[in-house]
Image: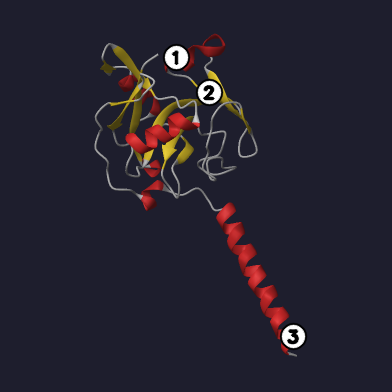
Amino acid sequence: MVRRIAILLWIVAGLVAVGFAWRLAFAPRPEPGRFAFPAVPSSRVVEAPDGHAYQYIAAPNLSWDKARAAAERHSWQGHKGYLATIDSGAEFQFVLQNVFPDDTDVTYLGGRQTAPGEWRWVTGPDGKADGGKGTLFWRGYDKGEAVGFATWMFSAFQHGGKWDVDKVCCVTLFSYRKRQFSTSLGTGDTDEGVAGYLVEYGE
């Protein structure tokens, strides 16, 4: 009898664990408005060892197109700015550790979905690659493959609903649970909690 109860308890515990794992893996996209972070002010220009430099600009609820145009109006030591493109894990870690010591809401980067399931860096030097189409760094969606560097949030690619993969356009940096890449409608929709954009300087 005791053995049967113990087995039953193990089965129940296993089902609870499976249910929790399922919810964690397939939870709906977080609504940034419900997980808002304290506003982070614009940063100073931070120079990297490779000669590039970065600057966060606070600009709540801006569209991606306006952020791109605004980034190009910035300059530093003769270098014209552009929405940042992150090509390696080392660059990603440098940006997180030196430009964003604190978590932020949605921050635009210089990447876009240029065709269904085709994600490219389209700004700065990377934007000139492949005949001006930009540098391809990810192909597909949640079960896609990296062509370059990519670190996507578990909820970046939604199938159905407001943030369906056919509706999102733009690559962002978002801090929900862990700072990673995510996707955005790019319209400045207040539900997304766009906080600003990241400018990069250097060729």
Say which residue label 1 marks. Answer: 125
Cα separation, mark 3 vs mark 2, equals: 58 Å
Say which residue label 3 marks. Answer: 3
Amino acid at circle 1:
Pro
Crowdedness near tag 2: few (<14), some (14–19) or many (≥20) residues, C-alpha within 10 Å: many
Q: Is residue 66 above or below residue 203?
A: below
Amino acid at circle 2:
Arg
Between discs 3 and 2, the one toward the N terminus: 3
The secondary structure type at the circle numbered 2 is: strand
Task: Give the x, y percent position of residue 153.
Answer: 51, 42
Task: Give the x, y percent position of residue 133.
Answer: 54, 15
Which mark, residue 120? 2
Q: Nearer the viewer, residue 1 or 167?
A: 1
The secondary structure type at the circle numbered 1 is: helix
Total labels drawn:
3
Q: Nearer the viewer, residue 148 or 127?
A: 148
Cα separation, mark 2 vs mark 1, equals: 12 Å
Amino acid at circle 3:
Arg
Residue beneath the point at 47% across and 19% down: 122
The secondary structure type at the circle numbered 3 is: helix
